[in-house]
Amino acid sequence: MSRKSHLPARTRLGVFTAGLLTAGTAMTVPGHTADAPAPAPAMGAFLGSGPEGVRRMAEMEKWLGGTELRVGHTYLPGGTWPDIEGQPSFLKDWAEWRRAKADRLFVLNVPMLERNEEHLDDLEVRAELQAGARGTYDQHFRALAERLVTLGVPDTVIVLGWEMNGITYSHRCGPDPAAWKGYWTRIVTAMRSVPGAGFRFDFTPSRGPDAIPWTSCYPGDDVVDIIGMDSYDQPPGQTFDDQVNGPYGLRKQVDFATEHKKPVSYPEWGLFRNGDNAEYMRRMIQWIDEQRPVYHTITDYCPHGVWQCTENPASSEVFRSMLGARTEPVLEHQPTDCGPLDLGDWIESWLGREICVPVLDWRLPSH
């Protein structure tokens, strides 16, 4: 998924409320037996890359009726190596949030190369990947690991080189898969070598075949802890069933993870080219609950989101009804004068009621 320079990089939200959804077959997760269900998946929403993302988590908890947000998620900028080393001023607020409660999870997307969104050509990318595989950039990742340990977040989940099967980023795999896998291994080895480090590394392609099958980029079980997938409501796959069963889709991710004895995650998901799609929202939440990922994060800005984006009212209602702490969610400052919103008989039948839209201005608080 392309990250426009003016858009923040993402965060993650809290935890499924017990009993809201019927759990499916649980995957085996390290530390749990095959007969015991994995923990309920922690959920998240990208709400801003810096301190504003931390602040908005509390506001979204309120919107969800008190559902606790257990996961903080942000993205390191990939313009220069000092960015990738993780400026303490950038990481400080996230680290403080994580340390405040023992059951919280901090997830950090880490670019593998500088100039990561400058559309370098394949020849230059290949040369950079080969240099990385030789160890040229090891010191930058050791510096990042040292900073995370110093900040008190040595158990951070590192989403390294995300969406490597596409063409958006300089850290893409396609120009030289062998060098990409060797470079990933060098980075993981360098970061694990720092005293006190306890990082988990999340291998996260985008759904579908994209520019190269993501299985061709998998670097090996010894250097991967979680197998993720970024999956938006867009082609390939018009329906949710297509997104599950299509080539290199959601089913392939789960089967691949099971084969490699790894848990799954969904670092990025949300609406996109198919618009406000309540069916997608319902099915994706059910899929997540069935698969029991380590965590999941909806991308919460337009056109993807459900809280900061007011363009998706039907999907927002589904998200809040299924994941919020209230069974009958209400607007934060809902006025008494409102009129029904016609979303169609099938949506209202599924929701079990009409949706009331205030006559006066009912926009969410500005951020």
Image (tube, rainbow, N blue to C red):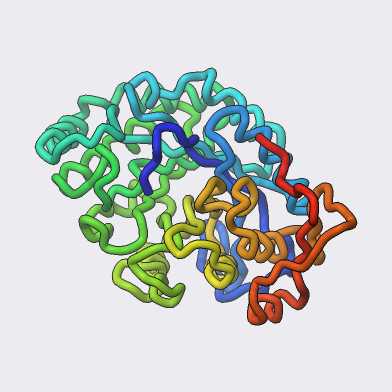
Instruction: Quadrant for the C terminus, please.
Output: top right
Instruction: Name the residue: 86% across, 52% down.
Output: 335
Within the image, what quadrant is residue 221 found in? bottom left
Say left or right for 153 vs 15. left
The reply to whether residue 33 is visible in this rendering is no
The x and y percentages for residue 212 are 21, 57
Q: Which one is nearer the viewer's eye here, 16 or 185? A: 16
In the figure, 327 relative to 239: above or below? above
Instruction: Name the residue: 56% across, 36% down.
Output: 48
In the figure, 24 relative to 267: above or below? below
Q: Which one is nearer the viewer's eye here, 279 or 209? A: 279
In the figure, 72 relative to 262: above or below? above
Q: Residue furthest front?
A: 359
Q: Residue furthest left?
A: 123
The x and y percentages for residue 186 are 27, 36
Instruction: Name the residue: 35% across, 29% down.
Output: 78
The reply to whether residue 280 is visible in this rendering is yes
Within the image, what quadrant is residue 315 found in? bottom right
Within the image, what quadrant is residue 306 found in? bottom right
Q: Which one is nearer the viewer's eye here, 45 or 193? A: 45
Q: Residue furthest right?
A: 336
Q: Which one is nearer the viewer's eye here, 155 or 85? A: 85
Say left or right for 207 vs 299. left
The x and y percentages for residue 47 are 58, 40
Instruction: Name the residue: 50% across, 59% down.
Output: 271
The x and y percentages for residue 133 are 19, 35
